[in-house]
Image: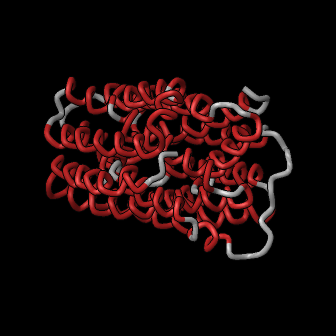
Amino acid sequence: MGSSAPRFAILFAAQFAAVGVMLPFIPPLMAARGLGAAEVGTILACGAALRLLAGPAGGRLADAIGAPRAVMAAGAAVAAAAAGLYGVADGFAGLLAANLLFALSFACVVPLGDAMALRGAREESWDYGRVRAAGSAAFIVAAGAAGWLADRAGAGSVAWLLAGTLAAAALAALALPAGQAPVRRGGGAFRAVLALPAFRRILAVSGLIQGSHAAYYAFGSIHWAQAGVPGTTIGLLWSWSVVAEVALFAWGRPIADRIGARGLALAAAAAGLLRWGITAETVALPALVLAQALHAVTFGAMHLATMRVMQQAIPPTLAGTAQTLLAAGIGAVMMAGTLAAGQGYATLGGAVFWAMAGMCAAAVALAPRLGRG
């Protein structure tokens, strides 16, 4: 590993510890404050809509001034303050305001971390997947800790844990190497990225497969809790979903090299069909354990496929713009899926996960268009 790899590992650990708290336990926090499924879906979808603008704007700013480290640190710091608002907000309006501030500030944080890490991996010849595994390991620990905390101190307590992890992410961003980032001169950055065929193809496939997680992220924990699954078990299920993902990131490079981006994407789509079918049909613990293990493929394999394409196809001067634009595109699919899931879950319950399986079926048709990578 090159000298910057440990610092990127710390950055990913802090960022994804925050994600490990946010994804499983912010929706139940909203439900505990009296919001219904449709209201939770609306708030999450509004946040996703704001990220569509905020993320690319942050990436474009980072490329324009050559300061992705500073933009990322500022975003994480403001997101920490927004997490504190989750702890004190009450009712639809208060939680909507907290979520919008969080979405505005956090939108560019993870994509800029990926952009900087891919550049470091390329220049110093270290394995991005192995360093990224630190983030997935931190997700496991944070999700388990948040579940334990929610059981003992109530759903609102996780907001303060989220704030702490985001403050750590801001400090980790500032600790990254201060080397001069390439500066994008002139305008037209968004058009330049969208003009790349490889970017358009990976955006379509990744949008469908990653977007298929929308109902899971928004209502997985709520669905299981309503079926009587304890909060600690829910946290462990989320943690377990990332255990195999850690192994894939840490030791899966030979597999990724062998099957390439196209093979990774096809595997992710096929795994999604199985995973969401199981989630739709049962809340039996053994079945959930199997379904959650497939997260290594539905998320992990697709993420590796995406990063391989981005590393090969995107010029360094467009890296921040491209990563945040990709995140915005995926977020657009996620927004639509979350909004639909809010209405669908209120009406259909767990059967809404079959719609997520349908998105993976569409991705099977598009994935062969990806280069081998």
* Residue drawn at x 54%, y 52% as measured from the top left: 85
Give x and y (percent) for residue 81: 62, 50
Locate residue 245, reporting x and y percent.
44, 30
Can you see residue 94? no
In this rendering, the answer to whether 24 lies above or below 37 is above
As displayed, is residue 173 above or below residue 323? above
Seen from the viewer's position, the closer of residues 81 and 364 is 364
Quadrant in which the N terminus is drawn: top right
Q: Against 366, is 177 above or below? A: above
On the image, which quarter does residue 121 sit in? Answer: top right
Residue depicted at x 14% and y 54%: 348
Please name the colour scheme applied to the rendered image. secondary structure
Question: At which x and y percent is residue 82?
Answer: 58, 53
- Quarter of the figure with residue 178: top right
Q: Nearer the viewer, residue 258 or 319?
A: 258
Going by the image, does 361 lie left or right of 177? left
Q: Does residue 57 appear in this view?
A: yes
